[in-house]
């Protein structure tokens, strides 16, 4: 019986960790590629799944084109409500993030499984390297770089893996942002 309860707890934990649906608090900011389920209460014609386009916009009936990238779910709901008020009296808008397909990071270089990974939660560098299978034996542990685009310009952030691994300096185990690229030489 004890093992069965442990098994059920494990299954519930796995489902919650690997679910594609994000419970959007006000902290998650929308990214290009995210899939949103939008509905307006009591308006069957205004229920639609939309993808945030590469230019950061969505298109919704009556509201037209709305900029969504970088906004929280609550901010997008408010923008849609404002646009829909021209046609409806006090519309009640609901936005749910169905998939965080736009919230990705990329790992390349001397790791076991390089590639792109969706972040259903915020990852640190070490967590991302773990997802990629870890470093190869030939990787330069203290020369890892995170490439990040900030305000249209590229920034390189040095990560000292060996120092993090030893616990001597955790300061370079930074939290990743959507679009970050981890380069492992």
Image (spheres, grey):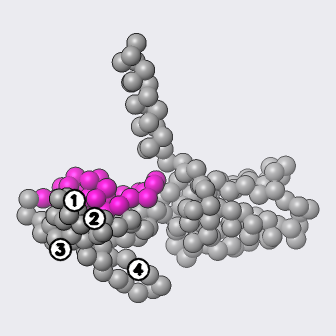
Helix or strand or loop: what does disc 1 sit on? loop
Task: Tell me the quarter of the picture where residue 174 sits.
Answer: bottom left
> For this view, does 45 lie left or right of residue 4?
right
The nearer-to-camera label among 4 and 1 is 1
Image spot of residue 53 (x, y percent): 56, 69
Decide: few, some or many residues near mark 3? Use Cα within 10 Å; few <14, some 14-19, many ≥20: some
Distance between the Cα atoms at labels 3 and 1?
A: 17 Å
Helix or strand or loop: what does disc 3 sit on? loop
Distance between the Cα atoms at labels 4 and 1?
A: 28 Å
Query: Which residue is drawn at the image coordinates 52% and 72% (left, top)?
Result: 54
Distance between the Cα atoms at labels 3 and 4?
A: 19 Å
Q: Are marks 2 and 4 in contact (CB under 8 Å)?
A: no
Distance between the Cα atoms at labels 2 and 3?
A: 15 Å
Is residue 116 shown to the viewer in this render? no
Query: Which residue is drawn at the image coordinates 41% and 37% (left, top)?
Result: 14
Q: Are marks 1 and 2 in contact (CB under 8 Å)?
A: yes
Check disc 2 and report the residue beneath it: 170
In this view, the residue farthest toward the bottom is 153
Is residue 20 shown to the viewer in this render? yes
Q: Please state which of residues 69 and 137 is positioned toward the viewer in this rendering.
A: 137
The nearer-to-camera label among 2 and 3 is 2
Check disc 4 and report the residue beneath it: 149
Check disc 1 and report the residue beneath it: 167
For the N terminus, the image quarter is top left
The nearer-to-camera label among 3 and 1 is 1
**Magenta region: which residues?**
108-136
Quick one: label 3 or label 1, which is nearer the N terminus? Answer: 3
The mark found on residue 143 in the picture is 3
Quick one: label 4 or label 1, which is nearer the N terminus? Answer: 4
The nearer-to-camera label among 3 and 4 is 3
Task: Tell me the quarter of the picture where residue 110 sits.
Answer: bottom left
- Is residue 129 covered in magenta? yes
């Amino acid at each position: 019986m004890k093992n069965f309860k442990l098994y059920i707890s494990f299954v519930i934990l796995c489902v919650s960790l690997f679910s594609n649906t994000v419970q959007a608090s006000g902290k998650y900011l929308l990214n290009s590629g995210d899939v949103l389920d939008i509905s307006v209460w009591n308006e069957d014609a205004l229920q639609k799944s939309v993808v945030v386009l590469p230019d950061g916009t969505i298109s919704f009936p009556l509201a037209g084109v709305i900029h969504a990238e970088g906004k929280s779910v609550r901010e997008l709901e408010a923008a849609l409500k404002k646009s829909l008020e021209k046609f409806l009296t006090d519309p009640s808008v609901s936005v749910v993030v169905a998939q965080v397909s736009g919230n990705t990071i990329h790992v390349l270089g001397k790791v076991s499984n390089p590639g792109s990974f969706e972040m259903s939660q915020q990852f640190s560098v070490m967590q991302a390297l773990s997802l990629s299978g870890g470093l190869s034996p030939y990787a330069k542990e203290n020369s890892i770089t995170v490439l990040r685009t900030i305000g249209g310009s590229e920034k390189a952030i040095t990560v000292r893996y060996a120092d993090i691994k030893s616990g001597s300096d955790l300061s370079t185990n930074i939290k990743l942002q959507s679009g970050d690229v981890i380069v492992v030489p």
